[in-house]
Amino acid sequence: MAKDTPLRWDRRMQQRLARGEAAALGELYDRYASLVHDLAHRVLDDEEAADAVTREVFGHVWQHPDAYDPKQGNLRAWVAHLTHRQAVRRLRETEAGALTPEELEQKVQRASVAARADYIVMSMPAPLRAALDLAYRRRRDYRQTAADLGVTEEEACRRLRLGLQLLSTAHTRGGPEDPPGYGRAL
């Protein structure tokens, strides 16, 4: 049996959710819960708040599967977008009295950049992600990265360069890393 393409899986999942299949929500949760929780935690820096956002996002997906539009992007991007918006909303609510409006917006901006960087890394092709992981988290130089990956030094440099180019867009809005804009709020 041929494997489903990601978009086909997304459409099927949306249809199953629309029919009220609890098993579909379980599959979606298994696939994306760590993404949702990690993004929320990155924005909020609070485990309990990230847990709450995770519940809210999956509750929204369960109640509004029709809000997902496959023409605007994949299901993963939509879930990430919902998570980011919900986490930022919660951050604004909880920090509103403690910070000046300027401090709050700076905190939201930093959290947004960090969340976009995480999203970029999680969305990268595995070869780029592996090269960045070796070079930056494990402190390998490009020669060691090439050896660990079993590729040429030139290929390791290419992968690192491409990965860094993608990451450099995290601080800008409207770049290729942004999940598609969906008009419905949580």
Image (tube, rainbow, N blue to C red):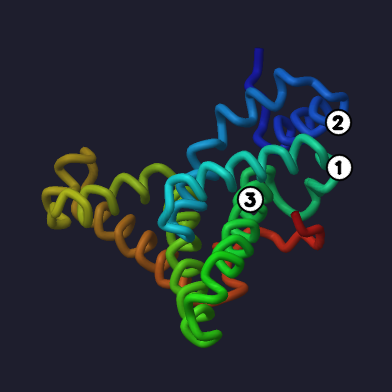
The residue sitting at 17% across, 49% down in the picture is: 138
Relative horizontal placement of residue 79, taking residue 106 as reference (left or right): right
Q: Amino acid at mark 1?
A: Asp
What quarter of the picture does the C terminus occupy? Answer: bottom right
Residue 106 is situated, as x and y percent measured from the top left of the image, at 47, 80
Disc number for residue 66? 1
Say which label, 3 or 1, has the lower sequence index. 1
> Mark 3 — residue?
77
Q: Tell which residue pokes out farthest to the top in this image.
A: 1
> Mark 2 — residue?
18
The residue sitting at 67% across, 53% down in the picture is: 82
Q: How many marks?
A: 3
The residue sitting at 49% across, 55% down in the picture is: 119
The residue sitting at 69% across, 60% down in the picture is: 180
Q: For mark 1, does the 10 Å Cα neighbourhood hold few (<14), some (14 to 19), or many (20 or more) residues?
A: few
Q: Are marks 2 and 1 in contact (CB under 8 Å)?
A: yes
What quarter of the picture does the N terminus occupy? Answer: top right
Front residue (pair 26, 5)? 26
